[in-house]
Structure formats: C-alpha cells, structure tokens
Image: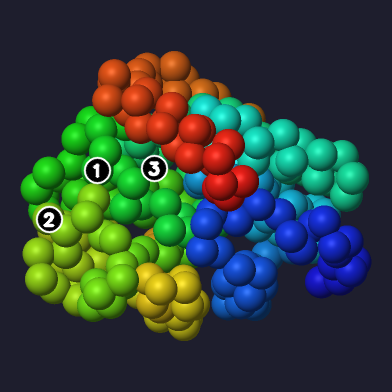
Amino acid sequence: MTHLRTPSAEFEQLPRMGYASEAMYTHRWGLIEPHLSLDKFTLVDWGSDAGWFSVRAATAFPSATVISVEAGLMTHGKGIALHRRMIEEYSVPNNFLIDTLFGPTTFEGLSTVPSDYQLVLSVFHHMGDGFGQYLTTVAEWNTAFCSLILGANVTFFEVPNEHSDGETPHRIREWYADRDVETVLCEAMQDGHVEADLQLLGATEHGEKGPRKMFKISLKSPREAVLAGTIATHIEAAGRTMRLRPYQWLKLKAFGVKHSLTGRE
C-alpha cells in the first residue's frame, strides 16, 4: 500500500460543518482505510463536501479512481472551491469532482454502473428532502437505500444516531420507525432482496449529536466495476433532472446569511 504523505495543516483543517472536529474525520478514515483491500479500484464519495475523504483516498491509493459528488450550491461554492485547490496542491489527477445535486432518482439504475467502493457518510438522511423525490414511508426509504447499496460492491454507510436526544434524524424518522439502525438496514435489504453482509466498524462522536455508527455493507455477489467515466455519466445525467423547490432555495439563502454572520458552515 502506498503511504499517504503527511498532510499540511490546511489539509487537516478543511471546512467542517458546524460541530465537526478534526478527530471526526481522522477517526472515520481510520475505520475505512483498512477495508480498502484493492490497490486499483473505483470509489464514489457521495456528498464529498470539501473533499477531505476523497483527496485522502486518492492520495493514499494513486492507482485508484475517486469520483466525488457534491452540489456546490449547498455550501455556496466554498467547499468545492477548496476541494479543487486540494486536488491541485496534492497532485491527485485520479480524483474527479462532479458538481451536481443528487437524490433517490440518482440511485435508480446504479446497479448497472457499479463501483468497487462508495462512501455514504452522514449523507443519506438528507435524501428525504425531495431532491429527486420525497421519501415519506418506510417502503420509499427502503427502495432508495437498496438502489444505493446496489451501486457498489462495498458501501461504507454512516447515519444519525437513533437514540441520542441531541441528534437530528428528522428526515429519516419515518424510516427508523422506532427501530435500531441495524434492524432498519437489515430489514430494508431483506425487503429489497439485496444479499449483503452488514458489519459494524465502529462509531464516531458527532459533538452534541452523539455517536454515529459506521457500517460496512458488502454485496455477497460482487460485480466487476465499470469505468469511472460511465459512472460519472450516469450521475451527471441524473443531476440534470434535479430541480430545487422554492422552499429549498429559501433554506439555502438563509443558510448563506447565517454563514456570513457567524463565519461558520
């Protein structure tokens, strides 16, 4: 395995969303990296933000191809701008950035363009907000989840805590339906006839929100990953169908005002 060179202070201090700390990033990477067993692979990083995990993976595994998917408008372009700078600074031509909205409709058909690995780190609970379609029932959440899981041979999946009083799983409360996370994931895969192994890798403290569990979900019948360009084409085509609703624009505008006043993401 190629050793990652010591990151600069700027790399270690990429923008973090409000409560996030450096330890949240390094600990999660510590859970993931030992399970990247291939030297040459394709990895999709959903909701890559400023690219901390993407650049980390692309630098540690120069023979791999990392596809980062992030909607720049969600952070008013700040995260993606820094991600592009990090790609240049760390000379990682194997990290490709796709600036697009994504949601449940993006995941439809992912099984036809599988990757080797994918990162879904505290991203999936945003899917119920109507980016592509609303998710309001357990069945709808299950379908979106299974479509996503079938998009990679191995998925590293992190979701909000179902017990902490400080957590904010409002977008997936209907999916949890008073069940623990392991039960939610297992029953979703059972309902979707997805044969996969579920392994709890650990949990990372997310400030006042409490610990969020990290799972490794491995398909029992892995497929050969397709070319990165084919995966990117699918994601970009799906992104062109996405439209923000008026209230979503208002939320983003309010977020931008708050950021300008507080200096925090």
Q: Secondary structure at mark 3?
A: helix
User: Are discs 2 and 1 less than 8 Å apart at CB?
Assistant: yes
Q: Which mark is residue 128?
A: 1
Estimate the x, y position of residue 14 in percent, counting from the top left: 71, 54
How far across and how far down the image is residue 32, in percent? 59, 71
Which mark is nearer the camera, 3 or 2?
Answer: 2
| Marks 3 & 2, CB-CB < 8 Å contact | no
Q: Which mark is residue 259?
A: none
Label 3 belongs to which residue? Answer: 111
Can see residue 192?
A: no
Give the position of the N terminus as an image quadrant.
bottom right
The residue identified by callout 2 is 174
Q: Which residue is pictured at 54% across the width and 54% down the height?
A: 17
Compared across the picture, whether 213 is left or right of 118 comes to left
Of 155 and 195, nearer the camera is 155
- Hey, what amino acid is under mark 3? Ser
- The relative height of residue 12 versus residue 128 in the rendered view (above or below) is below
Residue drawn at point x = 42 percent, y = 47 percent: 151
Q: On the rendered structure, is 115 left or right of 161?
A: right
In the image: residue 9, left or right of residue 175: right
Q: CA distance from mark 2 to mark 1?
A: 10 Å
Residue type, label 2: Glu
Q: Secondary structure at mark 2?
A: helix
Q: Real-space Cα distance between discs 1 and 3? A: 21 Å
Quarter of the image where one finds residue 195: bottom left
Spatial CA distance of label 3 from label 2 is 25 Å
Q: Residue at x 42, y 52 (%)?
A: 123
Crowdedness near tag 2: few (<14), some (14–19) or many (≥20) residues, C-alpha within 10 Å? some
- Which of the two discs, 2 and 1, labels the residue nearer the N terminus? 1
Tell me which residue sits at (81%, 39%) in the image. 85
Q: Label 1 is placed on what type of residue? A: Gly
